[in-house]
Image (cartoon, grey):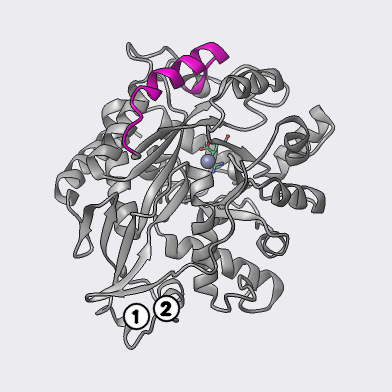
Amino acid sequence: MTARPARDDAVLVQQVDGGWRLPGIANLHSHAFQRAMAGLAERQTHPEDSFWTWRDTMYRMAARFDPDTLHAVASQLYVEMLEAGYTTVCEFHYLHHAPDGRAYDDPAAMSRALVQAARDTGIRLLLLPVLYMTGGFDGRPLGERQKRFGHGVDTYLRLLDALRAEEEDGMLRIGCALHSLRAVPADAMRAVLAALPADARIHIHVAEQVGEVQDCLAMRDLRPVEWLLQNAAVDARWTLVHATHLDDRELAGIAASGATVAICPTTEANLGDGLFRFGDYLAAGGAWGIGSDSHISVSPVEELRWLEYGQRLLRQRRNIAVSAATPSVGEALLHGALASASNATGFAVEDDAIVLDAGSPLLAGAGAADVADRWIFSGNRPAVREVRVGGRRVVADGMHVARDLVLPRYREAVGRLLQGA
Ligand code: NGQ
Ligand code: ZN
């Protein structure tokens, strides 16, 4: 399979009655449950707070979920995504079992909660059940709080099979996620990849933290992306999540492979990961998209804006994400994110559209040529007025049609999750 070419020549913005129509945006990386702890990990817990101390806080929250609370939180999240202009979500799902690690009576119960949330809200879902086996590159067993994430290769493949029976009408697909190289031994990775259908989408976290690069070098003699490119047939079916710490060869290798990098700028900033080498990667012709990951922000505007701003701050220059064909940064960013969507998600999403409100002050006097820049780079008022997914109108007047049903259930679920926290 080859990557589809960037759609710089495609019409991006169309004027419609009372607004500006754009294609829907794919959210390439989500851990839905983390929406319930957005803003709750911003207090010092240790003088050297880091990604790893955040992870302890996150694990404490992860331990409290059951299928019911997961459904309530994911439904609210997907409402927020749709209202913000995301029409497809790739759900990187690893809260599989009960907190003590035992499978639920239905081993797919937690996955089904996410499927139900997507159906209830009308977002397209690429569900990526995650294979998670070890607590580190050295193969150590899962920690107490990681037990509910764990699978063997056989039970994992059975989960994928059970869920594939649910695939339907272009709204739900099942892919495969490998949590990370530290969580999946090499032989298990090979066994799972060999068992997947030829067109399965494969997502993996890689090289997000310097510590992970160092551990990989120590245990496997190669950097994580280097190891992955040498040990798996990485191609356009693959999405590499974060890929923050790359040397020049790794960066060129990903770009040449046709894989998509899922960049999650607000989460990567929040967690102190580092800056993805976006300018260099664009120059190498690499495919990329965005993800809201931990959902401290649920806004394609903010992800794209900070993707560009990170490079401006780094390079002390302006207008980085442009091409000869597209001098508008906003348009070039949207084109880039759109170009990777079908490879990364497996959906052809031509039917999905969002309409920006022509009456919004940030679009006063706008013409088709500057709508994208104004949307991405001015202010913070939500401008999405209407959203259609697969022909169904799910957002009208800026509000999701099920907003009032979903929010009370979310409030109640968060109340339960935080009780005694
Ligand atoms: C996750 N999230 O799986 O939710 C990870 C943290 C880990 C991000 N890296 C846990 N943003 O990587 O071990
Ligand atoms: Zn993630």
Image location (x, y in percent) of residue 8: 55, 68
Q: Is residue 14 left or right of residue 344?
A: left
Can residue 304 be seen from the camera position used here?
A: yes
Which residue type carries mark 1? Leu
Q: Which residues are magenta?
A: 149-169
Where is residue 408? Give x, y as percent: 17, 44
Percent coordinates x, y for residue 318 in the rendering: 63, 79
Residue 219 drawn at (x, y percent):
80, 27
Q: Name the residue rendered at 64%, 18% in the picture.
A: 191
Q: Nearer the viewer, residue 216 or 126?
A: 126
Q: Quadrant of the C terminus?
A: top left
* Magenta-drawn stretch contains 154: yes
Q: Secondary structure at mark 2?
A: helix
Q: Which residue is mark 2?
A: 374
x 70%, y 45%: residue = 257
| Residue at the image point whose x is 38% and y is 15% from the top | 107
Residue 362 is labelled as 1
Q: Is residue 6 left or right of residue 148?
A: right
Q: Which of the numbered marks, if any, corresponds to residue 100? A: none
